[in-house]
Amino acid sequence: MLTVLILGGTTEGYELAQKLAAFPDLRTISSLAGRTSAPRLPAGESRIGGFGGIDGLTAYLQENLVQAVIDATHPFARRMGWNASAACAAAQVPLLRLERPAWRPGPGDVWQQVQSWELAAQALRTALRVLMSIGRQELAAFTALTEPFFLIRAVDPPDPMPPFAKAQILLARGPFNLEDERRLLIDNRIDAIVCKNSGGTATDAKLAAARELGVRVIMLDRPPRPQCRTVADTKAALDWLYDLGLISQGP
């Protein structure tokens, strides 16, 4: 049986796993990082947790006779992207990057694009009430700011909670719609948003709401990734697998 490994956890990874489940002669394994306490499991087989670096991933590819790897990890999963590139080269397994396009500022947007959380924290020195939409693991860089109030939106609560002077946790999982995001910003008197340039449609409503209300957005740019063939949607990923001879044109 032919085997494809999806390095997943994103909307695109779940969508691809669902489509590959229609091919009965294909074994699809989705690998999830396990950053949330109860991750949604994709179609097909799944595994949770790391591989043990480049050597561990190389061994996994060889032991499971993986014929192709699709890196559908989050755009900010920097380490896994580089590990996948090195392991696939070592095991001589074709690698494809499935990555949603980055968000781009448009007319009416008030964006400040930064390359680190430290620079993002500096940009907040004049802010009063901040929506943090960055995940619970990147909060430490902002705890030295004692004046702003931070509304921290996360899937799971931070453990331990960083020592913010003024903060509130909002547990929520996207996708979020424009009406709710607009109401969230208005009701909490938000004057700045901090987020990653994740791209996609699941969480972009906050950017549209910020544009309408003139709210400033501090946007962390994506980290560099290794050179790799990259596609923007699952259809193109399926075409790549078809060109490799791993799937037929239809289920």
Image (cartoon, rainbow, N blue to C red):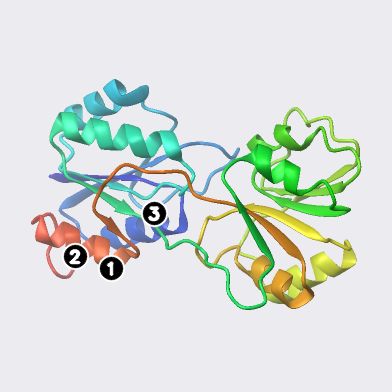
Is the N terminus in the top left, top right, bottom left or bottom right quadrant? top left
How many marks the image carries: the answer is: 3
Q: Position of residue 7 (x, y in %)?
A: 36, 43
Front in this rendered view, residue 73 or 106: 106
3 and 1 marks in contact (CB < 8 Å)? no
Q: Amino acid at mark 2?
A: Asp
Q: Residue at horizontal 78%, vertical 31%?
A: 162
> Can you say whether 30 is above or below 99 in the image?
above
Mark closer to the chain start, 3 or 1? 3
Per the image, label 1 sits on a secondary structure element best described as: helix
> Can you say whether 118 is above or below 208 in the image?
above
* Residue 136 in view (yes/no): no
> Can you say whether 66 is above or below 188 in the image?
above
Task: Please name the residue that numbered disc 3 is placed on.
Answer: 13
Task: Please name the residue that numbered disc 2 is placed on.
Answer: 239
Mark closer to the chain start, 2 or 3? 3
Q: CA distance from mark 3 to mark 1?
A: 12 Å
Q: Position of residue 245 (x, y in %)?
A: 8, 56
Q: Amino acid at mark 1?
A: Lys
Is the C terminus in the top left, top right, bottom left or bottom right quadrant? bottom left
1 and 2 marks in contact (CB < 8 Å)? yes
Per the image, label 2 sits on a secondary structure element best described as: helix
Within 10 Å of disc 3 (Cα), the crowding (few <14, some 14-19, many 20+) is many
Left or right: 72 as drawn, with respect to 237:
right
Front in this rendered view, residue 19 or 85: 85
* Residue 62 in view (yes/no): yes
Q: Amino acid at mark 3?
A: Gly
